[in-house]
Amino acid sequence: MKAVRFHQYGEAGELRYETVPDPEPLGDEVLIRVRACGVNHIDVMLRSGELRLPGQQPLPHILGMEVAGEVIAAGPEVRQFRSGDRVLAAVVTCGRCRFCRAGWEQLCDDRRMLGTQLPGGYAEQVKISERGVLPIPPGLSFEAAAASRTSFATAWHLLITRGRLQAGEVVLINSASSGVGSAGVQIAKLAGATVIATTSTAEKAERLSQLGADIVVNYRLQDVAEIVRRATEGRGIDFVFDMVGGETLTRSLELLTKRGRLALCGAVSERRATVDLISLFFREIEIIGSTGSTLQEVERVLQLVNQGKLRPIIDRLLPLSQAAEAHRLMEQGKLFGKLVLVPDALLEQSPTSTGASSMRR
Ligand SMILES: [Zn+2]
């Protein structure tokens, strides 16, 4: 099959489109023909070598953590799926450790993600244990499913489960035009919150307004603190959704009202930040870490997408062979929403059946 691999850590140009052996499903594994694979910031960090995770696959490495496709073969122990099923796959957990037993499988001691520990979806085929597979609701396209899984479920876990967001609260979403940020805007609105979104260009600001953000701040031109102060009549915000880290996180903490919460699911600009601890304890501020999501949360957000209550935002589809270009676009911050890779043969076959034009805004 064709796949994109990198043989050493480095620039986007290290991603090579090449022929590799087909995976063979064993035991409880299903073999999935990839129809769409979401590109995530973690892919860029793994490729550059900036992020190394326990149990990472040896080089050459196949990225791609969220895969939508159809089952084409199954190992002898597979019980729930069969050929032809439309499925979504990303991560397998052990089901036995204390975190899995408590329903917190995002913290599983033996969590194996496609594209990190397991060869991922930058390929024509992927194999994974059926425990890491969910059916795609009828009516949802492969591209929409691949674009929805990580961004909506991550934002849901952060805002609703970890962050306990309530109707009527004021939320600041940093870097709101990213995949997870734009998902956060939609979920916060659905929860009845008032959303202040930050972004870097007028065009992205316009699109965030269309998504439902109440106030959009262009942080390159405008003073975020001043706008927050005016919008909340000096009271401060209740909640910050951050994935930027560094100075952005430091400044955001100062915008919170007493008892405010800041939850983060990434640190894409800088992993260290300065925190004024005296200000933190006097105001009873909470800083909350949030990682991934549970399968239950994924099912919930897919339901909401299928009902039209959440709308996947796909910046563009690219052929798998252009994965390096996909990474450059992501590194340059030129995307609004998700970038999805589609195997070249499928894009060539049916350029209009991919659903991209109806979802691209
Ligand atoms: Zn576990």
Image (spheres, grey):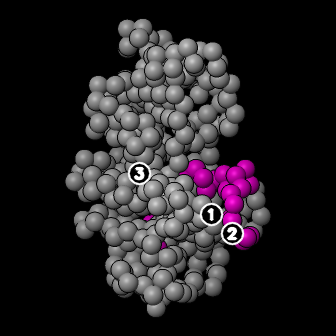
Residue 83 is covered by the magenta coloring? no
Q: Are marks 2 and 3 in contact (CB under 8 Å)?
A: no
Residue 56 is covered by the magenta coloring? yes
Which residue is farthest left? 307
Residue visible at 43% across and 57% down in the picture? 103
**Residue 63 visible in the picture:** no
Residue visible at 42% across and 46% down in the picture? 157
Does mark 2 have its CB less than 8 Å from ligand 1? Answer: no
Instruction: Please give the range of residues in magenta.
Output: 34-60
Tell me the amino acid under the disc marked 3.
Answer: Ala
Residue visible at 49% across and 61% down in the picture? 100
Q: Are marks 1 and 3 in contact (CB under 8 Å)?
A: no
Tell me the amino acid under the disc marked 1.
Answer: Thr
- Could you say where residue 244 lies in the image, as x and y percent from the top left? 58, 35
First of labels 1, 2 by sequence position: 2
Q: Which mark is residue 310?
A: none
Say few, some or many: other residues with alpha carbon within 10 Å of mark 3 (under 14 / 14 to 19 / 20 or more). Answer: many
Q: Which quadrant is home to the N terminus?
A: bottom right
Q: Give the residue at mark 3.
A: 153
- Mark 2 element type: loop
Tell me the amino acid under the disc marked 2.
Answer: Gln
Say few, some or many: other residues with alpha carbon within 10 Å of mark 1 (under 14 / 14 to 19 / 20 or more). Answer: many
First of labels 1, 3 by sequence position: 1
In the image shown, does 237 or 94 lie closer to the viewer?
Answer: 94
What is the distance, in whole Å, between disc 1 and disc 3 at their CAs?
Answer: 18 Å
- In the picture shown, does residue 203 fall above or below 222? below
Does mark 1 have its CB less than 8 Å from ligand 1? Answer: no
- Mark 3 element type: helix
Residue visible at 59% across and 27% down in the picture? 248
Q: Give the residue at mark 1.
A: 116
Q: Which mark is residue 57?
A: 2
Q: Are marks 1 and 2 in contact (CB under 8 Å)?
A: yes
